Image (cartoon, rainbow, N blue to C red):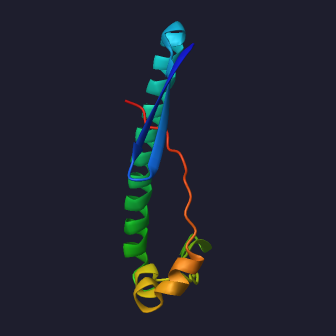
């Protein structure tokens, strides 16, 4: 496997891109890329299916918080609490606190073409 590296600097941001040449494993790489793309599409389709089923079930429940089938409780709506920070409001009202508590980082995402 051959590798090439290019480095680009723009306004104090440096990006390094290493390129692996997968020609020696072309068939395996192409198969894995196809598998990856199919899995992503499958997840998206399943999420849409789940959302549609949840919407239909919530419509069936109406204002109720649980439902039974044959006398057995099968569906329950469970209330959860969530806390979050309005980052834009914090930044506007207390810019020093926002800056002092801001944590930034990098992460990677695999994109296949």
- Position of the C terminus by quadrant: top left
- Position of the N terminus by quadrant: top right
Residue furthest right in the image? 72
Q: Which percent across, then down, holds residue 79? A: 56, 83
Q: Which percent across, then down, holds residue 38? A: 43, 32
- Residue 63 image-quadrant placement: bottom left
Residue under the image location 37 percent in, 60 percent down: 52
20 shown above or below 37? above
User: Which one is in front, 41 or 78?
Assistant: 41
User: Which one is in front, 13 or 76?
Assistant: 13
Residue under the image location 46 percent in, 42 percent down: 15
Q: Which percent across, then down, holds residue 72? A: 62, 72
Q: Which percent across, then down, holds residue 42? A: 44, 40
Residue under the image location 43 percent in, 69 percent down: 57
User: Which one is in front, 91 or 49?
Assistant: 91
Residue 8 visible: yes
Residue furthest top in the image? 24
95 shown above or below 74? below
Residue 78 visible: no
Residue furthest bottom in the image? 93
97 shown above or below 21? below
Task: Left or right? Give the position of 13 relative to 101.
Answer: left
Residue under the image location 58 percent in, 79 percent down: 100
Task: Left or right? Give the position of 71 relative to 10.
Answer: right
User: Which one is in front, 18 or 60?
Assistant: 18
């Amino acid at each position: 496997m051959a590798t090439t590296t290019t480095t680009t600097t723009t306004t104090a941001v440096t990006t390094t891109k290493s390129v692996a040449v997968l020609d020696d494993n072309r068939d395996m790489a192409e198969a894995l890329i196809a598998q990856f793309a199919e899995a992503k599409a499958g997840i998206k389709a399943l999420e849409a299916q789940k959302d549609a089923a949840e919407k239909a079930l919530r419509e069936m429940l109406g204002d109720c918080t649980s439902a039974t089938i044959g006398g057995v409780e099968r569906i329950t709506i469970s209330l959860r609490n969530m806390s979050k920070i309005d980052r834009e409001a914090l930044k506007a009202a207390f810019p020093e606190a926002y800056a002092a508590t801001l944590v930034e980082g990098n992460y990677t995402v695999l994109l296949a073409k």
